[in-house]
Image (cartoon, helix red, strand yellow):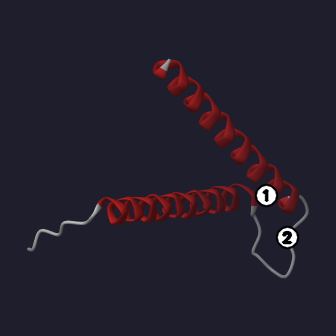
Amino acid sequence: MDNFKFDEATQKELSTFLEREQAQARINATVHTLTSMCWDKCVTSTPGSRFARGEESCLLNCVDRFLDTSLFIIKTIEGQRSQLQS
């Protein structure tokens, strides 16, 4: 396999591209996990043209709690990281 040497600007561009793609992959994985978890928890009847009573509010609450928890974890980790860097 050939060894490719890129200039600094190209390396930075590739790095930025890879970071964006990895972030998108993480978002997609999170959405998949959220969808599966909330669906399994909240949808108890056979899906039709409408959700059964309570399923819609359960889905909304499930998504809200998942997002709240994710944001809390991210903020906590960022706080710990900034304390370690200080």
Q: Nearer the viewer, residue 65 or 53?
A: 65
Mark nearer the N terminus (1 vs 2): 2
Q: Quadrant of residue 46?
A: bottom right
Q: Mark 1 points at which residue?
A: 59
Q: Quadrant of residue 52?
A: bottom right
- In this picture, residue 32 sits left or right of residue 10: right
Q: Residue at 67% of width from left, 34% of height from top?
A: 72
Q: Residue at 44% of width from left, 65% of height from top?
A: 17
User: In terms of secondary structure, where does tag 2 sit?
Assistant: loop
- In this picture, residue 44 sits left or right of residue 10: right
Q: Is residue 69 above or below residue 31?
A: above
Mark on residue 38? none
Residue 24 percent location from the top left of the image? 53, 63
Q: Which of 20 and 39 is in front in this view?
A: 20
Q: Which of 44 and 8 is in front in this view?
A: 8
Q: Which of 19 and 58 is in front in this view?
A: 19
Q: Indicate the quadrant containing the N terminus: top left, top right, bottom left or bottom right.
A: bottom left
How many callouts does the rendering have? 2
Q: Name the residue under label 2.
A: 51
